[in-house]
Amino acid sequence: MTADLSQLVKAYDVRGVVPDQWDEPLAELFGAAFVAVTGADAVVIGHDMRPTSPGLSGAFARGAAGRGADVTMIGLCSTDQLYYASGALDLPGAMFTASHNPARYNGIKMCRAGAAPVGQDTGLAEIRTLVEEWSQTGAPEPGTTPGTVTERDTLTDYAAHLLSLVDLTAIRPLKVVVDAGNGMGGHTVPTVFAGLPVDLVPMYFELDGTFPNHEANPLDPKNITDLQARVVAEGADLGLAFDGDADRCFVVDERGEGVSPSAITALVAARELARNGGRGTVIHNLITSRSVPEVVREHGGTPVRTRVGHSFMKAEMAAHGAIFGGEHSAHYYFRDFWNADTGMLAALHVLAALGGQDAPLSALVAQYDRYAASGEINSTVDDQPARTAKVRSAFADREHITTDTLDGLTITSPHWWFNLRPSNTEPLLRLNVEAENEETMRAVRDEVLTLIRG
């Protein structure tokens, strides 16, 4: 019987419920297909702390070795640690994680050598086709000579590489609360922060893929309430929250207030431009704050706007030779990290910026947080195109309005802008509004929501 992968293979990765949607035999076929499509003679594999991750990654390794590829297993790691291994070893890689999804889920994030992404248009569709074919016809033909499987620890080298990219030698002592959400930040933070002038207050560092304390998704406000309270109680300088596979990082200031990922994007962009002599391209997606391109230009750089989604970000990073890229989802991309995303490196930039001056974090980021934003608001609709057309028509004849359709519908005025884009997987429209002040933002937000939902 042919496996149904329609709900398992997504646009950028493989993700589903274990064992209902996939299991170790299917993971072994994915390993074989990955080698067949990439043509790799060697691969690197890592996994997160989920109970099913060791078994699934081991099965993938058997499939890859069966096709003749030598396999390096780096064991427990964050997703950006796997990207480090792929870049440093110049090998295609596979990371077993379902990020912030519930415990019953697992998945695979795959990349080519140098951490280059594997998505629907860059190999994932071909991998899916092979797995579906082999699930019906039986195991694929083995390689002439089976590959070897060896283990390697990359955590220390990963930490050293990150620390080589940010100068933290002269920062003032900082008290930092870190909420790892029982995810891989509990594995990586102690090694990365070792030796820094940081008084580390750990929260939920115990690796537990059942997420006993809260969902490991820091963009959901309810998941950072523990961190916010702890920062205030400890009198800490800041707080950091990582998601399950620790590739995203969310920042909380000394008051326990969340710092906009757009403000972090602008802050890091300014620092990366300074590190590159005030020259370079910075990529930002179209729902980041208007402050991001403003700050980039103020610091001598060239901003480039792109669609939402890491495959678009990485493609634009490569196409423009960009030095940095940021998304409002708290993904941060660095040229010196193979154009891949690493929340840990962004966190180190925040520590360096804060520790290099005397003001509190709230004052430091105020210069990068210039506008009132709605955050992303989802609306369930019966007809995405019709509702979007209704909104576009309502604004079409107004003065000083510009419209573009790079990703959904973006309407811009001199004093505000909004983006309305459809979900690819659910009957939703996602709205983001930003304006010069809170009153204007609320007025635009409410008008658009009435059009969508009315």
Image: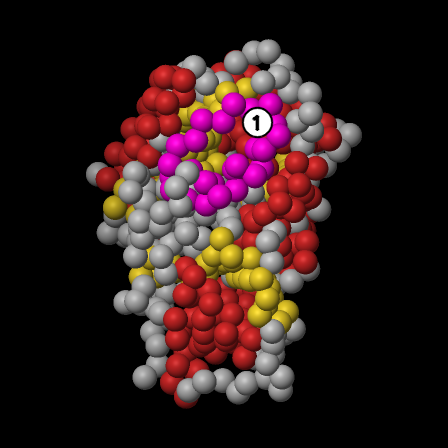
Residue 451 location (% of width, % of height): 28, 37
Residue 26 location (% of width, % of height): 40, 73
Residue 34 location (% of width, % of height): 54, 71
Side of 400 relative to 421 (left or right):
right
In the image, which residues are magenta? 180-204
Q: Is residue 189 visible?
A: yes
212, above or below 267, in the image: below
> Hey, which quadrant is residue 334 in on the image?
top right
* Residue 175 within the magenta-colored segment of the rendering: no
Q: Is residue 367 visible?
A: no
383, above or below 268, in the image: below
| Residue nearest the observer in this picture, 39 or 25 | 25
Quadrant of the snapshot with the C terminus: top left
Residue, x 67% and y 42% (percent of image)?
161
Residue 292 location (% of width, % of height): 57, 30
26, above or below 383, in the image: below
Side of 424 relative to 269 (left or right):
left
On the image, numbered disc 1 is attached to which residue?
Answer: 350
Residue type, label 1: Val
Side of 372 relative to 34 (left or right):
left
Residue, x 39% and y 81% (percent of image)?
135
